[in-house]
Image (cartoon, rainbow, N blue to C red):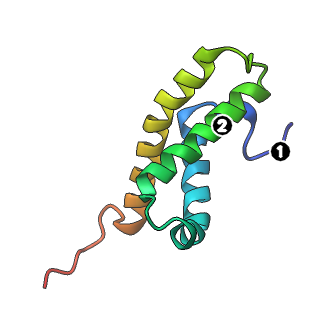
Amino acid sequence: MEGQLFTWESLSAIGGASLLTFFVVQYTKGLVDRIASWLPTDVYAVGVSFLILLLAQIAKGADSADWRLYVLSFANAFLVASAAAQLHNKVINPPGAKRNKS
C-alpha cells in the first residue's frame, strides 16, 4: 500500500497509533461528551487506542482467538493514549511559546 499515510504496520507502532488516537479523540470527543458526559477523555482515549491497536494486529494476521492479543493491546493502549495526550499538550502549549502570566 504505497502512498498511504497510515499502514497497518504504522498503526501497530506507538507513533502511528498515538497520532491516529489523537485525531480520533479530537474529532469525536464533543459527540462523546454529549452522549456520555460521565466518561473522562483519558479513559475514552485508552478505549480508542485499544481498538486501534487491536484492529491493527488482527489486520496484520494475529490470531483473534488468542487472549494474549487482547491483554497486550490493552496494556499498550495506556502507553499510546499517554503519547496522544502529550501530542495534545504540545498542540495547546507549543514549546517556546510565551505564556501569559496574569
Q: Position of residue 12 (x, y in %)?
A: 64, 31
Quarter occupied by residue 69: top right
The numbered dot on residue 3 is 1
Q: Residue furthest right?
A: 1
Looking at the image, residue 11 sits to the left or right of residue 41; the answer is right
In this view, the residue in front, 90 or 40, is 40
Q: Position of residue 31 (x, y in %)?
A: 60, 70
The numbered dot on residue 81 is none
- Could you say whether the residue bearing mark 1 is in a helix, strand or loop? loop
Looking at the image, residue 101 sits to the left or right of residue 54; the answer is left
Looking at the image, residue 18 sits to the left or right of residue 59; the answer is left
**Residue that badge 2 annotates:** 11
Quarter occupied by residue 50: top right
In this view, the residue in front, 30 or 79, is 30
28 over 47 or under it: above or below: below
1 over 97 or under it: above or below: above
> How many circles with numbers are drawn on the protein?
2
Q: Position of residue 6 (x, y in %)?
A: 72, 43
Which residue shows up at 39% across the image and 59% down it? 90
Three-letter residue code for mark 2? Leu
Three-letter residue code for mark 1? Gly
In this view, the residue in front, 29 or 4, is 29
